[in-house]
Image (tube, rainbow, N blue to C red):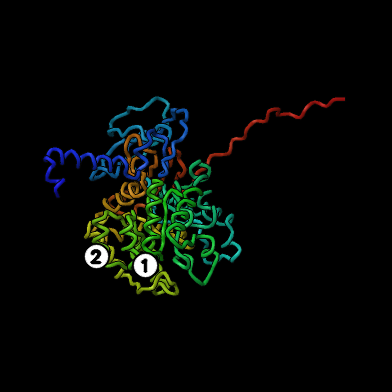
């Protein structure tokens, strides 16, 4: 008290500013965007990519309705794509594009950003597969490639894959990034992290509970697990209950130090622990108290409700049974009530389907119905589509690159024969899908160019010598 009394107000003010400035300068870095610059950074890990020589290839989508996920409503216009970036959005009467451009007339259709699915499991086994196939990483990779093709044909151009078998999720993410397979962009967690016997690791033991999760006990072990999946190639960290406060604190802190967002499959008291730890997102509509929902809103923790996948469980099985990580009663109304409470609290919500195994065969029906849940819960159709595009891009930490039709962004674009911003069922009419500037889908199905063979150094057998 004596020391403070001797300080003048200006001196005290400068001291406070100095302390605040030091704290800001030495705060943990949680956004790698502040450290790097340049267009060729296309992953939440923010790893600078080697510049490539521009080819100057121009594709023009002429005369459609444009739903850009920024404006309040669709408008007429033309989209110009150069290489893998959106070059310009032109007025309907403009022809301001280079000669020799590839021009596609899309009159009567809607142009919109590619859909993003924030919760997938593309390598999980189908229910009718034998144990050998379920436990095979190679089988998982091939299964994942099949599921990713279905998603791409449905207009989903980015997915967040929240755990799978072995190294298959990382391999698929790399192949997709190289445009080597018909696939959405894949941003993967690789393995989820849980306590021994936690979610995805409980008994009875199955292949999906052996090689799909990392079991860790103690704060140091949870921190090490985050580092392990980061090393393997994770671009998002997924945690799951059960855990204690010190464990989730350590995992979230380590992920943020690495510049990655963290999401959690957790319920009841574990959700509150995760929010207190500084988690970025909570998956699913699992039970949580009103106090936890209020804390989520105050802490700006987002949610990915995945309502329809749990409706599927209720429709087929009557509820979620036989799991030590689902020790609560689940009802369709209870799940929806949680959704409505989160919306009323102002919590930002993204769109994810939690596609596992046979649920992939429901693509895109499960995605479209998830959007309908949003509308039932009070979203307009336009806002539901924005949740599926620009909001999802923000939650993915990729909104500077994806999620809207704006010049400079990556060219992930749909052409839909209809008005999906007015009628969500028109998302069943995806005609053209462009991802990374490449037309992958024409007429609603994957259209791959013929392989061009490399020439031999000596195309003919050598002359016979005697």
Image height of 249 relative to 337, above or below: above
Between 78 and 71, the one nearer to me in the picture: 71
Horizontal and vertical percent position of residue 459: 70, 29
Horizontal and vertical percent position of residue 395: 34, 50
Q: Which residue lies furthest to the right in this view?
A: 466
Q: Crowding near pointer 1: few (<14 within 10 Å), some, many (20+)?
A: some
| Residue matched to label 1 | 311
Residue 201 placement, left or right of 451: left
Residue 52 placement, left or right of 264: right
The CA span between labels 2 and 1 is 25 Å
Image height of 11 relative to 318, above or below: above
- Quadrant of res 71: top left
| Residue matched to label 2 | 291
- Quadrant of res 375: bottom left
Would you say the residues marked 2 and 1 are in contact, meaning their CB atoms lie under 8 Å apart?
no
Horizontal and vertical percent position of residue 431: 41, 46
Image height of 350 relative to 21, above or below: below
Horizontal and vertical percent position of residue 43: 42, 43
Q: Crowding near pointer 2: few (<14 within 10 Å), some, many (20+)?
A: few
The local secondary structure at tag 1 comes to helix
The local secondary structure at tag 2 comes to helix
Image height of 101 relative to 287, above or below: above
Residue 95 placement, left or right of 462: left
> Total marks drawn?
2
Q: Earlier in the sequence, mark 2 or mark 1?
A: 2
């Amino acid at each position: 008290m004596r020391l403070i009394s001797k300080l003048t107000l200006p001196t005290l003010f400068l001291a406070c500013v100095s302390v605040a400035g030091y704290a800001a300068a030495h705060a943990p870095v949680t956004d790698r965007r502040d450290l790097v610059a340049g267009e060729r950074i296309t992953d939440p890990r923010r790893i600078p990519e080697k510049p490539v020589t521009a080819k100057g290839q121009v594709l023009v989508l002429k005369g459609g309705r444009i739903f850009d996920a920024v404006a309040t409503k669709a408008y007429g216009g033309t989209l110009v794509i150069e290489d893998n970036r959106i070059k310009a959005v032109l007025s309907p009467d403009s022809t301001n594009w280079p000669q020799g451009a590839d021009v596609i007339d899309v009159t009567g259709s809607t142009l919109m950003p590619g859909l993003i699915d924030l919760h997938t499991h593309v390598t999980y086994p189908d229910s009718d597969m034998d144990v050998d196939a379920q436990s095979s990483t190679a089988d998982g990779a091939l299964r994942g490639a099949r599921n990713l093709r279905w998603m791409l044909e449905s207009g989903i151009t980015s997915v967040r894959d929240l755990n799978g078998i072995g190294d298959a999720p990382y391999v698929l993410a790399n192949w997709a990034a190289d445009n080597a397979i018909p696939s959405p962009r894949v941003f993967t967690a690789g393995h989820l992290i849980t306590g021994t016997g936690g979610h995805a690791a409980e008994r009875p033991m199955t292949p999906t509970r052996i090689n799909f999760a990392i079991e860790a006990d103690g704060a140091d072990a949870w921190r090490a697990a985050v580092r392990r999946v980061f090393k393997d190639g994770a671009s998002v960290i997924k945690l799951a209950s059960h855990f204690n406060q010190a464990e989730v604190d350590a995992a979230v802190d380590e992920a943020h130090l690495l510049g990655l967002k963290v999401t959690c499959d957790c319920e009841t008291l574990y959700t509150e622990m995760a929010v207190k730890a500084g988690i970025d997102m909570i998956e699913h509509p699992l039970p949580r108290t009103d106090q936890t929902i209020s804390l989520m809103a105050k802490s700006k923790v987002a949610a990915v409700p995945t309502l329809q996948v749990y409706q599927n469980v209720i429709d087929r099985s009557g509820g979620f049974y036989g799991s030590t990580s689902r020790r609560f009663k689940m009802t369709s109304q209870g799940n929806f009530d949680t959704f409505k409470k989160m919306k009323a609290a102002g919590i930002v919500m993204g769109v994810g389907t939690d596609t596992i195994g046979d649920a992939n065969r429901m693509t895109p029906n499960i995605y479209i119905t998830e959007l309908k849940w949003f509308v039932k819960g009070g979203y307009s159709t336009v806002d539901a589509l924005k949740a599926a595009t620009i909001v999802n891009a923000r939650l993915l930490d990729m909104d500077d690159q994806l999620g809207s039709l704006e010049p400079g962004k990556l060219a992930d674009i749909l052409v839909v024969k209809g008005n999906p911003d007015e009628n969500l069922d028109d998302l069943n009419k995806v005609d053209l899908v462009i991802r990374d500037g490449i037309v992958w889908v024409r007429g609603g199905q994957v259209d791959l160019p013929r392989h061009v063979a490399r020439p031999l150094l000596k195309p003919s057998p050598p002359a016979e010598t005697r």
